Image (cartoon, rainbow, N blue to C red):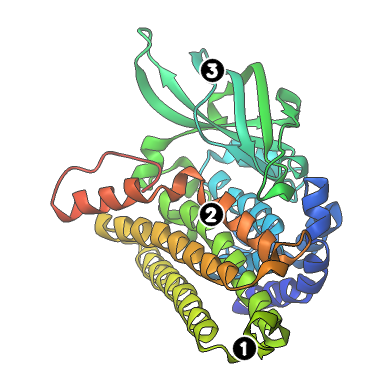
Amino acid sequence: MTENVGQAVIAGVTELLPVLRERAQEAEDGRVVPAESVKALEETGFFRLLQPARFGGHEADPLTFLTAVRLIASACGSTGWVASVLGVHPWQLALFPLRAQEDVWEADSSLRMSSSYAPTGRAEAVPGGHRLSGRWSFSSGCAFATWVLLGGIVPDADGNPVDFRTFLLPAGDYVINDVWDTVGLRGTGSNDIVVDGAFVPEHRSLSFNDVFRCECPGQEANPAPLYRLPYGSLFSYAITTPIIGMATGAYQAHVAYQQERVRASYVGQKAAEDPHAQVRVAEAAADLDAAWLALERNMTELMEYARAGAKIPLPLRLRVRRDQVRGTGQAISAVDRLFENSGGRALKVGTPIQRFWRDAHAGRVHAINDPERALSTFGRGEFGLRIQPDGMV
């Protein structure tokens, strides 16, 4: 991908921000991102940023993708979340056997996938592949996808787990159950996926043993450095970045509001003149800068190793996860600080600050944002203890 293509996508996304901001309440009320917004993002080329060039994608630097995600989420948290989740899946499909990629993109390279990775269903090894049954929750943006990626543990004959795989299924093999009714990220339409005995051929599944080693069958067809990145590094930041974006949107809304706000309880003092309010803004800005600068550093270093064809060292992968969960925490600290200083009028339904606050906290509870797990793993690495193969690293 040329740098100009990435800049054009960022420019197109930037032009969309005012209308995405206007539709934020519509997304929340309808419990789904407006279809017009998804179409507009598609027209900018956003969903092709991480898609292989052989299927019409841009094979962009991950920083280009994450920058676009942050911008989108700063206008509407739900739209940013859905865009990030749907937009990162082409990268994972590029790791599958080429035949699986052809199944999805050969006839229509614009097709999208949603996902649900927690292994809550049953996967049974059968001749030629696996048989899948069960219910998977939290499949964000599934209304705009015609395929789904589902996580599953594969047991041996005695019921002992021997592999964790991601299974790729077409829309005809599953049903969407509309259950999404939440206090945050209401517009993501993160509904349940129900599968009843669907057969998944061998080429449409991917072992996390290969993913952890960064040695996947799709890399032969897609040799670009982008596809040598660790799953746990890119996917974890695809969850944290929208949260940073939401906090950025809250920051922008807060500053604009405080410039006009007069605090009646302080004898008509303008809120912007309150030194305590100024300190809170400075602290929130510092948290957001720290989170984003760590992301930029980490993604830059990851790509340097990938471009050199060198193995990405485990300490760097552990640091990425450390900084990713810390980045989520810093974004939450920033949005909390701003919300606390916004006054009672910020509680009104429809105001951006309370929506960003709810959306950011909803994103925070995603499993990949578990700070203790990521930080403990980093500590194990620092102490020279064994690190278990894990899709989160």
- The residue closer to the viewer here, 67 or 211, is 67
Q: Are marks 2 and 1 in contact (CB under 8 Å)?
A: no
Contact between labelled residues 2 and 3, with CB atoms less than 8 Å apart = no
Counting other residues with Cα less than 10 Å from the Cα at mark 3, is it few (<14), some (14-19), or many (20 or more)? few
- Decide if residue 148 is on the left or right side of residue 178: left
**Tag in front: 1 or 3:** 1
Up the image or down, 164 lies above or below 374; here it is above
188 above or below 24? Answer: above
Marks 1/3: CA distance? 66 Å
Query: Residue 128: which numbered mark, if any?
Result: 3
Q: Amino acid at mark 1?
A: Ala
Tell me: residue 393, above or below residue 154: below
According to the image, label 1 marks what residue? 272
Q: CA distance from mark 2 to mark 1?
A: 33 Å
Report the front residue among 51 and 379.
379
Front-lying residue, 147 or 238 = 238
Regarding residue 61, the answer to whether it shows in the image is no
Q: Nearer the viewer, residue 329 or 350?
A: 350
* Mark 2 lies on residue: 239
The disc, 2 or 1, on the residue closer to the chain's N-terminal end is: 2
Q: Secondary structure at mark 3?
A: loop
**In the displayed image of the protein, which residue is found farthest to the right?**
36
- Would residue 181 appear left or right of 64 to someone viewing this image? right
Look at 38% across and 64% down and name the residue there: 302
Q: Amino acid at mark 2?
A: Ile
SS for callout 2? helix
